Amino acid sequence: MVRVLALVEGPTERNFGQKLLAVHLAHHGIEFHPRVIGKPGRKGGVGAWERAKRELLGLMRQEPRSVCTTMFDLYALPSSWPGREEAIKRGLKHLDAITFVEMEIAAALAAECAGAERVARFIPYLSLHEYEALLFSDPMALASVTQGADDARRFREIVAQCGECEKIDDAPATSPSKRILNIARSYVKTVDGITAAERIGISAMRSQCPHFGSWLSQLESCGTISG
């Protein structure tokens, strides 16, 4: 079994990794191990790049034969992260922005690593724009959790207006999580966000969220790595 170590943003992403991704990836010969960035018990949030870089390099050096990945939100990603400010200056949006920042993260880590093999085993991933975007993959399943009579229609309208789930924008008042909260005030990310994900399933998410699907395909391919 190939081990994949994932540094993730918070408890919701860790639970998603443990309950959905780990189960799915086990069928591809992969052990998926998510851990929340920072000290145990801290609140979610990415924080400065230097801390993330230190933790990522620590994982890569402790287990040089394992694959290392990330699961952070592009939404509210600090300007200290590689490529973040430049992407904004260039006016990059959606997939263009996230691809640029992910490449810059990989390059920044490569500059710190002596061994090229370690870099080759790093797969950067940022949610476009936020974890909750995945939950719009199946409005009916999401509505079954939020339980509002008209929730499914409202969720579908949001996706239609934005073009696709991952294009739901990252403005403070209209990010994916804020849109869910505007419709369902009782929504709790760490509980309802995972329940909804389990009802939606990995297949629907990957089909409706291309960037997430691409990352998942990369992780699945790790099952062919040996040594």
Image: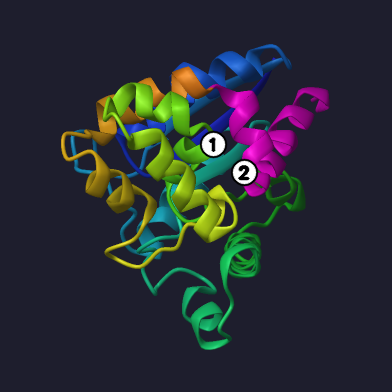
Q: Is residue 49 above or below residue 30?
A: below
Q: Secondary structure at mark 2?
A: loop
12 vs 150, nearest the viewer: 150
Residue drawn 28% across the image and 52% down it: 178
Q: How many numbered circles does the render carry?
A: 2
Q: Is residue 137 above or below residue 46?
A: above
Q: Quadrant of the N terminus?
A: top right
30 vs 64, nearest the viewer: 30
Q: Secondary structure at mark 1?
A: helix
Magenta highlight on residue 48: no
Mark 1 or 2, closer to the camera:
1
| Magenta stretch, residue numbers | 201-227
Quadrant housing residue 145: top left
Structural crowding at the residue carrying mark 2, measured as other residues with C-alpha within 10 Å and reported as few (<14), some (14–19) or many (≥20): many
Asked if residue 126 shows in the view, the reply is no
Tell me, yes or no, whether the two marked residues, 1 and 2, touch with CB atoms within 8 Å.
Answer: yes
Q: Amino acid at mark 1?
A: Ser
Q: Amino acid at mark 2?
A: Cys
As drawn, which residue projects farthest toward the bottom? Answer: 89
Say which residue label 1 marks: 137
Magenta highlight on residue 209: yes
Say which residue label 2 marks: 209
Left/right placement of residue 7 relative to residue 41 reads right
Marks 1 and 2, how far apart at CA: 7 Å
